[in-house]
Amino acid sequence: MAEENRYTRCEACGNDVPGYDTVHLSYDKGSRLLCLRCFNDMISESHGIDFTHESFDPITLQDVDGINHEFHFRVHLLGTKVSIDAFELKNGEPAGYEFQVVGDAEEDLLNLFKKLFERLRRAMVQKHLKEDDRFGPQITDEATVRGHIEWDEDTDGMLPCLVIDGKEISWEAFGRMLMTFEGFHFQLEIFDKSEERQEVVRKGVKNADGSRDSTDSGTT
């Protein structure tokens, strides 16, 4: 089911655009709300960059469980760099899966979008959590978890909310999942959302019922 967008009016061109596709510019005497197309045009002109804004239609991809995920896109010129963000929507705001690629401002945006699309496809075939009838969500046998960190309103930001497999997981719930691995070592790696990293796959996991699986280690 498609998520309803919340629209707001750009103070430069007068067009109504989704709220996530705008920026607020602050000045000494006030502020302006611009759509990203107008903002990008302003930045490219001020930097003397040959840049043409592109808009990409939403696409729907299916994950390994057969669930559809509708991705929306945002193009943001950052001086001599440009980013394309992909994200799902919840109540008209970015939520769920979120990804980003960054390239040179004068790079072909379509080529950059293709890189982002391939990253989305790779993410859709990855699964990090499984549902256990007794214990609820658990980390899969690969013992590798990928996701991103978000603000948790319920704790007023004192604890993070993790988004794993496109689902919001509280820090407390994730802690319960980790207790399946009591006595194990772990490696926590944090990096920018525009990056992708290779990871080491574990050897031997204790299941939620206390039994242990054993698999060969390697890299993915």
Image (cartoon, rainbow, N blue to C red):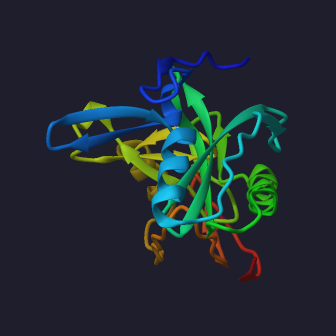
Who is closer to the viewer here, 121 or 171?
121
- 159 left or right of 167? left
Residue 27 seen in the figure: yes
Who is closer to the viewer here, 46 or 16?
46
In the picture, the quarter occupied by the C terminus is: bottom right
Residue at the spot 75% in from the left edge and 40% down from the top edge: 56
Who is closer to the viewer here, 145 or 34?
34
Count of marks placed on residues? 0
Residue 201 seen in the figure: no
**Residue 50 at x, y percent in the picture:** 65, 63
**Residue 172 at x, y percent in the picture:** 35, 44
In the picture, the quarter occupied by the N terminus is: top right
Residue at the spot 83% in from the left edge and 44% down from the top edge: 64
**Residue 95 at x, y percent in the picture:** 53, 36
Residue 55 is drawn in which quadrant? top right
**Residue 205 at x, y percent in the picture:** 62, 68
Q: Is residue 5 above or below residue 48?
A: above
Residue at the spot 45% in from the left edge and 72% down from the top edge: 188
Who is closer to the viewer here, 174 or 108?
108
Residue at the spot 48% in from the left edge and 49% down from the top edge: 42
Q: Residue furthest left?
A: 28
Q: Is residue 27 above or below residue 93?
A: below
